[in-house]
Amino acid sequence: MAPNGAAASNGAPAPRTRARQRARDWAEIQERMLVPLYEAVYQRLEVGPATSVLGLGCRSGLALLLAAARGAEVVGLEPEAELRSLAQDRSLRVLSDVYRELSPAGGAGWHAPAHSLVTAFEHLSCTADPAALVRDAARLTVPGGHVALATWGPSERCQSTAVLQVARRLSDPLRRARYAPFTLSEPGAVERLVADAGLRLGGGGLVCCPFAYPDLDSAVRGLLAMGVFDAAADHSGERQVRKEIAEALHPYLREDGSVRMENVFRYTVAERVG
């Protein structure tokens, strides 16, 4: 095994080095692509000084920063240490485990403080157990508060679909079924999660979130930072994954060398009624 910070034997970065690179690329390149989604949810729910926001899977925290700029009280949960560190560098309160770290005594039976808005902007589409995530979000929301869930929109309206297929194609065949980013985009999928968590559906919407990059290298780095290609890189090698992502991006290259893909994301709002 390569030491931390050293290159692996196949020429790829060591896991910790790769994680740091991915986190930085997410914060500097990819995260801003979802700003229209964040703002649409905040406008819909009139987020402001009376709102307490908990971001589940908040990554490097841009969505929390936007909520804080509206006057909201914000806290985040991010299990990945490198992303959590970047969020904390932005003076955000971001924890690795809401239940453990917010508990004053860590005792059994303690309940985490509830919030008037709990969001899952990026985490829902990639978590291994979406139903558990939505149930946790419901438990962390005050009665009368809201849960906001985000997924990819219909695959036929997302030009990034072909690029995301690289992640599935180059992953271990025994694990491919675990990554299906558009499963929750199917009609009724999120609604079932909402109902099973005891929440009341409160509407939602579609938001255009173009993925736009100044050049091909930035596009590859930004997409890799999403985390969905990590299993493919582990199985097929990072060099092959980069090559195939670049090939999938060629239809979206512009004459000036920039890259732009039109995408649609969907958000769903639910209310905790009791």
Image (cartoon, helix red, strand yellow):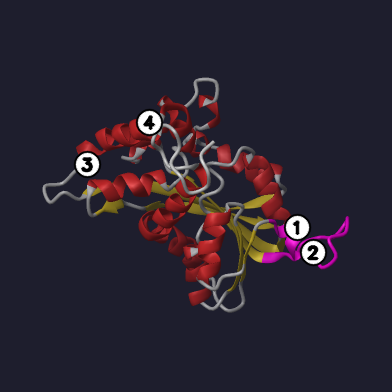
As drawn, the label of residue 99 is 1
The disc at residue 166 is 4
Point out the frontmost of discs 3 and 1.
1
**Count of marks placed on residues:** 4
- The crowd level at tag 4 (other Cα within 10 Å; few <14, some 14-19, many 20+) is many
The spot of residue 131 in percent (x, y) is: 66, 41
Residue at the image point whose x is 62% and y is 41% from the top: 130
Q: Is mark 2 on a helix, strand or loop?
A: loop
- Are dots 2 and 1 in contact, CB under 8 Å? yes
Disc 3 from disc 1: Cα separation: 43 Å
Query: Residue at position x 61%, y 72% from top?
Result: 51
Mark number, residue 103? 2
- Looking at the rendered image, the disc whose residue lies closer to the viewer, 3 or 2, is 2
Q: Do the residues labelled 3 and 1 touch (CB within 8 Å)?
A: no
Q: What residue did someone put label 3 on? A: 252
Considering only vertical position in the picture, is 34 above or below 220? below
Is 100 part of what is drawn in magenta?
yes
Instruction: Tell whether position 130 is magenta.
Output: no
- The residue lying toward the viewer, choosing from 178 and 48, is 178
26 relative to 215 in the view: left or right = right
| Type of amino acid under label 3 | Tyr
Start-end of magenta stretch = 97-115
